Amino acid sequence: MKSRMPYPGLRPFTRDENHIYFGCDDQVGDLLEKLNDHRFIAVVGPSGCGKSSLVKAGLIPGISLGFLDQRIESWRIAVMRPGTQPMKNLCDALCHPDVFNSDEGHNIHKRPLMLATLMRGPSCLKTVCQENKMPEKTALLVVVDQFEEIFRFRREFSIDQAEAFVNMMIHSVRQDDIPIYVIFTMRSDFLGDCALFLDLPQIMNDSQYLTPRLNREQLQSAIEGPASFFGAEVCPKLVNVLLNDMGHDMDQLPVLQHALMRMWVIATDSGLDTLNLDLYEKIGTLRHALSNHADSVYNHLEAHHQKIAEILFKALCQVSSNRQDTRRPVSIADVASIAQVHARDVIDVVNQFRAKD
Ligand SMILES: Nc1ncnc2c1ncn2[C@@H]1O[C@H](COP(=O)(O)OP(=O)(O)OP(=O)(O)O)[C@@H](O)[C@H]1O
Ligand SMILES: [Mg+2]
């Protein structure tokens, strides 16, 4: 279903949001070319520069439309994150109705059997394709979003399982019996960690894409395009101010998105079809849009929810001596355990920050 919001805010664009994804046609063209040459690509770049969005809302729709290899008539596209159980997450992505639809017929054994097959060795992704009778002229694409999570998994859970997962991806790309394509998205500050895995540096060297910053014209189209899709507009003065306030700072893309989303919510609530400078002032400009909104949500929380919010944000921020502070994934269960509350309370707090108003 097509999203009815032109701006996703802080989250990445999804596969269904190609209609509101603007400014990256050149990047998508470059990625298609590299992926076609190598059947693998690692999309790298700094935190928040737009890697996941580029793959999900730009590249995947392009591949589905047949722009990668015209000999392939149909694609099975499995999108996953390594998280704390990479092999199981891969299995779940493969079981999706659009991939191998393994829950079809309510066969409760299919999923565990597939996981057991995957665990058998590096060639077993190919085996899964064969066992699921992937038709001729059909290819499998595995997208491993936030690939950097594998390093944390390797450090905190299991070196063997991390290696098994990485080896399977490499082997799948290198074999020629079944067309399997693999895409990683990864923060560039983890590039050095790739050497922890024996064969990973080579495949990363063969086909890597450093995500470029959007130039002024591309940013302008990313600001104006989504509003115009919904029959609305962003007034030229505001476009200019936004572009100037963005400057050259790549960290600002999520903030720009958040500001546009906040302005859109206020404009539609007030029956306006133009985003203008008044709205921009109202949300606190790029400089304060995020903190104003977070403060306002925080101030409306009950006291015990405020305490949970503090613990949640501390857990989400990874402070490091040699790298900049970055976001890190954390489970609801972990936050609940630190805060000594029920998971339901943590979800309540998260939902308040996720709400559009
Ligand atoms: N072409 C675009 N136009 C407008 N906004 C964009 C574009 N691409 C990404 N964004 C916005 O930028 C922010 C970061 O995007 P995304 O999550 O895709 O980046 P990332 O590089 O994958 O981040 P991370 O390093 O956290 O994985 C999000 O708010 C997203 O909506
Ligand atoms: Mg990402």
Image: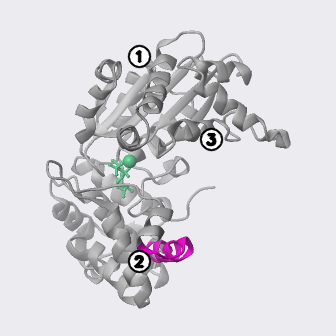
Q: Residue at x 29, y 55 (%)?
A: 220
Disc 3 residue type (three-letter): Asp
Q: Residue at x 15, y 58 (%)?
A: 247
Magenta stretch contains residue 247: no
Residue 144 vs residue 58, the one in the foreground: 144
Query: Does the rendering let one see residue 98?
Result: yes
Disc 2 residue type (three-letter): Ile
Neighbor class of circle 3 (other Cα within 10 Å; few <14, some 14-19, many 20+) is: many
Q: Residue at x 48, y 32 (%)?
A: 161
Q: How is the image coloured?
A: one colour
- Which residue in the structure is indicated by mark 1? 37
Counting from the top left corner in percent of width and height, residue 60 is at 51, 37
Disc 1 residue type (three-letter): Asp
Q: Quadrant of the N terminus?
A: bottom right
- Residue, far right: 105
Question: Which label lies toward us, 3 or 1?
Answer: 3
- Which residue in the structure is indicated by mark 2? 308
Neighbor class of circle 1 (other Cα within 10 Å; few <14, some 14-19, many 20+) is: few
Counting from the top left corner in percent of width and height, residue 134 is at 70, 22
Q: Bounds of the magenta span?
A: 339-353
